[in-house]
Amino acid sequence: TQLLEQSPQFLSIQEGENLTVYCNSSSVFSSLQWYRQEPGEGPVLLVTVVTGGEVKKLKRLTFQFGDARKDSSLHITAAQPGDTGLYLCAGAGGRDDKIIFGKGTRLHILP
Amino acid sequence: DAGVIQSPRHEVTEMGQEVTLRCKPISGHNSLFWYRQTMMRGLELLIYFNNNVPIDDSGMPEDRFSAKMPNASFSTLKIQPSEPRDSAVYFCASSPRLALTQYFGPGTRLTVL
């Protein structure tokens, strides 16, 4: 059974600080996605990474896919209150390329 | 274009009652997913369809849950009879095909008293 472990589960930091959250697995994924979910809404895709070692940047957010395609990280520079939300990673793999989700990191940026 | 549409947005019912959640996927999307989200268990995949055919229902918790997709533009998730432990937010998502980006609806918040 494929599992995605996200850490930390909760993170509360001051505006302007930097942070990194992680998504780890013992399984190899063909691609990995990061979603952000705000209260009362469904998750919204931020980025998809498909190549081992790939790095993608989205303004102050930097996403990296591990060389072995088993893990990923999300780094936020100079966090802002608008970054508050639940960050979910999702990996596609296995025989039928089904997508599975981690439980998420709940991020709270204090003004 | 309209995104994934779910109804109702909120549902409060009593234990033992039948609950039907509805979903209209994005037009042209071939895959549809039903998820349940709770604080304890996170986002759990219940069932997914490809071209209206159920592919994997291994996430459906028990026989009280059933899902149908009679055509490409409509799906239902039914719980009968409902129990308090079914209280959660239920999301429907669609994608152009499996393993591509999933577009989520706004969810249905279900409370079973």
Image (cartoon, coloured by chain):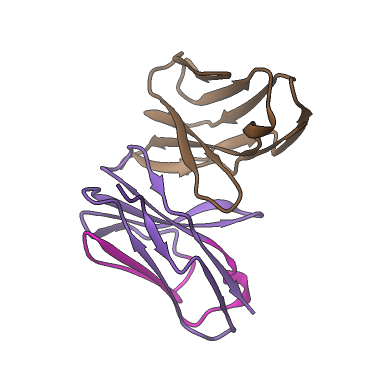
Chain colours: A brown, B purple
Q: Nearer the viewer, residue A5 or A75?
A: A75
Residue A68, position in %: x, y? 46, 19
Q: Residue at x 68, y 18 (%)?
A: A78
- Across and down, in percent, residue A37 comes to 55, 43
Coordinates of residue A34 in the picture (x, y in percent) = 50, 32
Q: Nearer the viewer, residue B105 or B39?
A: B105
Count of marks overlaid on the render: 0
B55 vs B107, left or right, is left
Task: Specify whether residue A15 is in view.
Answer: yes
Q: Up-down: is A26 above or below A18?
A: below
* Quarter of the view holding residue A107: top right
Indicate the position of residue B11 as horizontal and vertical percent values: 53, 73
Q: In the figure, B58 relative to B110: above or below?
A: above
Residue at the (57%, 53%) spot, across then down? A40
The reply, left or right, for residue B49 in relation to residue B28 is right
Q: Is B103 situated above or below B89?
A: above
Of A71 and A111, nearer the camera is A111
**Residue extent of the magenta highlight:** B61-89
Q: Is residue A29 visible in the rendered structure shown here? A: no
Q: Residue at x 57, y 30 (%)?
A: A23
Q: Is residue B26 magenta?
A: no
* Quadrant showing the C terminus of chain A: top right
Q: Is residue B62 magenta?
A: yes
Q: Residue at x 61, y 27 (%)?
A: A22
